[in-house]
Amino acid sequence: MYTRRNQRHLTSAQRERFVQAVLQLKRQGRYDKYVSLHSRYFTADGQSGLRVAHMAPTFFPWHRKFLLVFERDLRLIDPTVTIPYWDWTADRAESSALWDDDFMGGNGRSSDGQVMTGPFAYRNGDWPINYSVTEEKYLTRGIGRPDRPIELPTTAELEGALSMPVYDTAPWNSAPATKGFRNRIEGWTASENLGGYLHNRVHQWVGGHMTGASSPNDPVFWLHHAFIDLIWVRWQRRHPSSAYLPAKPLGGGDAQHGRVISAGEPMPPFGVKPSAVFDHRAYYTYEEN
Ligand SMILES: [Cu+2]
């Protein structure tokens, strides 16, 4: 049992230890498997087959397990390290200490998006991009999406999602017809102006590698998804009589049969059922502030 903390409250020593553990995993050649794994399970609505990581009810439990496996690797390197979370309703600007040179490093430069400062800048030698959907060998960002500026989701927008009592609904995908908390938070197709589009808007706001299937190339991915995980915790706390849906496997006549996972079916590649990770307190707690 360990504690995940808000990144804004980490000491400089804690920031350093997180960065060093991530760099060590990269040096050992064990970081990029997380990038490729996330890409491999990035099946979209329009594709055939099972969706687990995205555009499906398992968005929350799949990423919870994904973070747990990554965090276990970090903690084998340094047992004091946990994944910090980035509350983007509070730390909303490029001037946030999140982006300082001793932590995530700064924005990409305007010419090619290349991150030039911090531990994950290509020119500092520790962070080559080895597996990506794009060609660049260097980490890229475009904070605020300069060509079509956007803002991070607000407290009010998050509150709107947390107040939704139903976890997910048919057709269990990213279409606007899918009502419920999961699709509202995951946020693919909802209009940017309607208060939806939360998790995905954060990927868009950071820009560069964070916008695609190989988004774990940017270590801020883990901090963003730790907050997404905490949001799930908050929703569970607020709606104790609401449960993960679908509860049972979808019937053979359902158009989504074989495409989404119910509470008791195993999630590839982990072989873990969503129900096995419903209660995060079996593994860690959040220090909320
Ligand atoms: Cu994400």
Image: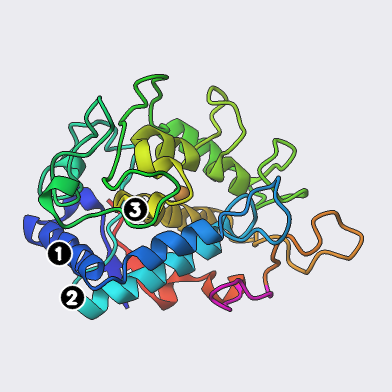
Tell me whether circle 2 and circle 1 mark residues in contact (CB < 8 Å): yes
Q: Amino acid at mark 3?
A: Asn
In this figure, which residue is indicated by the disc labeled 2? 78
Q: Amino acid at mark 1?
A: Gln
Indicate the quadrant where residue 154 lies.
top left
Does the magenta stretch mainly form a helix, a strand or a loop?
A: loop
- Which one is closest to the eye, mark 3 or mark 2? 3
Please say if 271 is above or below 20: below
In this figure, which residue is indicated by the disc labeled 3? 217
Q: Amino acid at mark 2?
A: Asp
Q: Quadrant of the N terminus?
A: bottom left
Check if residue 270 falls in the magenta segment. yes
Mark 3 closeness class: few <14, some 14–19, many ≥20 residues within 10 Å? many
Q: Residue 25, image x and y in percent?
A: 24, 69
How far apart marks 2 and 1 lie (CA) works out to 9 Å
Q: Secondary structure at mark 3?
A: helix
Mark 2 closeness class: few <14, some 14–19, many ≥20 residues within 10 Å? some
Asked whether mark 3 and ligand 1 are closer than 8 Å, the reply comes as no
Indicate the quadrant where residue 16 lies.
bottom left
Q: Which residues are magenta?
A: 264-273
Q: Secondary structure at mark 1?
A: helix
240 or 98: nearer the viewer: 98
Q: Residue 196, image x and y in percent?
A: 56, 33
Please say if 99 is above or below 231: above
